[in-house]
C-alpha cells in the first residue's frame, strides 16, 4: 500500500510540475514577445526572394503570386505583417494586362530598357487605362520608338506637359502622378518600411503599457 501510494504521489508531483512549467512558459512568452527583426534582415529576405525567381532581374515588374510567399518568410523571422492584404492589393495581379504584356519575349526586352526611367511603370499603366490604351502600350512594346516615348514622358518637360493633356482624357486623371501600385521590389521594400515603422511603434506602446 505504501509503495502504491508513493508511486501515485510521484505521478501527481510530476504532473503538477509539468503543469507549472507549461504555465510558466506561457506566461513568460506572453511577457516577452519575440522582438521584431532588424529591417536590414527584412531587406535581405525580400531581395533574396526575388533574386531566386527564374529569369528575374533587378527592376523587373513583380506580380502578386510572387509577393504572397514573402509574408510567411517574414513571419518566420518574427514579423507578422499586419496590413499584408492592403500591400498585396497594391501589387499587380498575375493576369494584369501590364504584367502579361511585359512578360512576353519582346516585353522583357522593352521592360529592361525602360525600368530605370522614373515612374515608367506608372505611365505605362495609366496609358493602358485610356481608351484604346492597351493597343497603345502594345505598340510601344513591339514597335520602334517605344522606349524613347517612355523616356520622353518620364524625364522631359514636354513629356510632363503631354501628361497634363492626357489627364483630361477619359480615365486619364492624374496621369503624371504615381498610381499607388507596387511594381518593383524596391517599391515593395519602401511600403514594408512604412508597415515596419508602425509595428515598431505599436510594440513600444505595448511595452510601455506593461511597465
Image: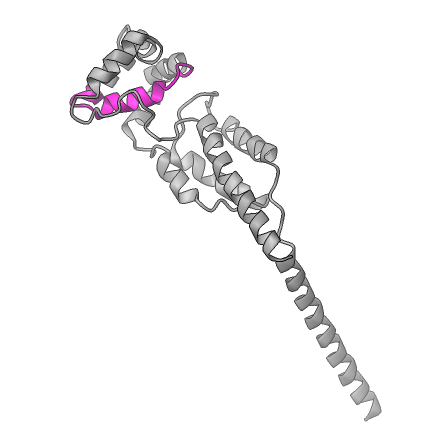
Tell me what residue is drawn at x 73 percent, y 80 percent: 12
Taking the image as shown, residue 172 lies to the left or right of residue 109, namely left
Q: Is residue 35 magenta?
A: no
Q: Quadrant of residue 65?
A: top left
Q: Is residue 51 left or right of residue 38?
A: left
Could you say which is closer to the camera, residue 100 or residue 201? 201
Residue 64 percent across, percent down from the top left: 39, 35
Q: Considering the image in quadrants, where does the N terminus appear?
A: bottom right
Left or right relative to 66: residue 26: right
**In the rendered view, would you say 191 is above or below 104?**
below
Residue at horizontal 32 percent and vertical 7 percent from the top: 148
Span of residues in magenta: 115-136
Residue 46 lies, in percent from the top left, at: 52, 32
Q: Quadrant of residue 140?
A: top left
Q: Quadrant of the C terminus?
A: bottom right
Q: Nearer the viewer, residue 110 or 53?
A: 110
> Residue, x 59% and y 56% (percent of image)?
209
Image x and y of residue 27, in percent: 65, 63
Residue 24 percent location from the top left of the image? 69, 65
Colour scheme shown? one colour
Q: Quadrant of residue 155?
A: top left
**What secondary structure is the stretch in magenta mostly built from?**
helix
Say if 92 sits above or below 19 in the image: above
The residue furthest right is 2
Amino acid at each position: 500500500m505504501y509503495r502504491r501510494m508513493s508511486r501515485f504521489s510521484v505521478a501527481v508531483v510530476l504532473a503538477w510540475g509539468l503543469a507549472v512549467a507549461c504555465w510558466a512558459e506561457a506566461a513568460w512568452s506572453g511577457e516577452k514577445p519575440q522582438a521584431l527583426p532588424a529591417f536590414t534582415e527584412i531587406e535581405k529576405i525580400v531581395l533574396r526572394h526575388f533574386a531566386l525567381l527564374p529569369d528575374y532581374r533587378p527592376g523587373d515588374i513583380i506580380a502578386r503570386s510572387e509577393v504572397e510567399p514573402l509574408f510567411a518568410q517574414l513571419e518566420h523571422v518574427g514579423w507578422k505583417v499586419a496590413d499584408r492584404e492592403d500591400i498585396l492589393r497594391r501589387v499587380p495581379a498575375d493576369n494584369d494586362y501590364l504584367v502579361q504584356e511585359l512578360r512576353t519575349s519582346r516585353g522583357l526586352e522593352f521592360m529592361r530598357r525602360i525600368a530605370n526611367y522614373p515612374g515608367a511603370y506608372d505611365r505605362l499603366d495609366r496609358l493602358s487605362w485610356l481608351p484604346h490604351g492597351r493597343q497603345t502600350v502594345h505598340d510601344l512594346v513591339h514597335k520602334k520608338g517605344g522606349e524613347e516615348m517612355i523616356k520622353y514622358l518620364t524625364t522631359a518637360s514636354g513629356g510632363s506637359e503631354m501628361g497634363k493633356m492626357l489627364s483630361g482624357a477619359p480615365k486619364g486623371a492624374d496621369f503624371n502622378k504615381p498610381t499607388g501600385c507596387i511594381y518593383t521590389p524596391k517599391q515593395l521594400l519602401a511600403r514594408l518600411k512604412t508597415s515596419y515603422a508602425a509595428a515598431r511603434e505599436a510594440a513600444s506602446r505595448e511595452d510601455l503599457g506593461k511597465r
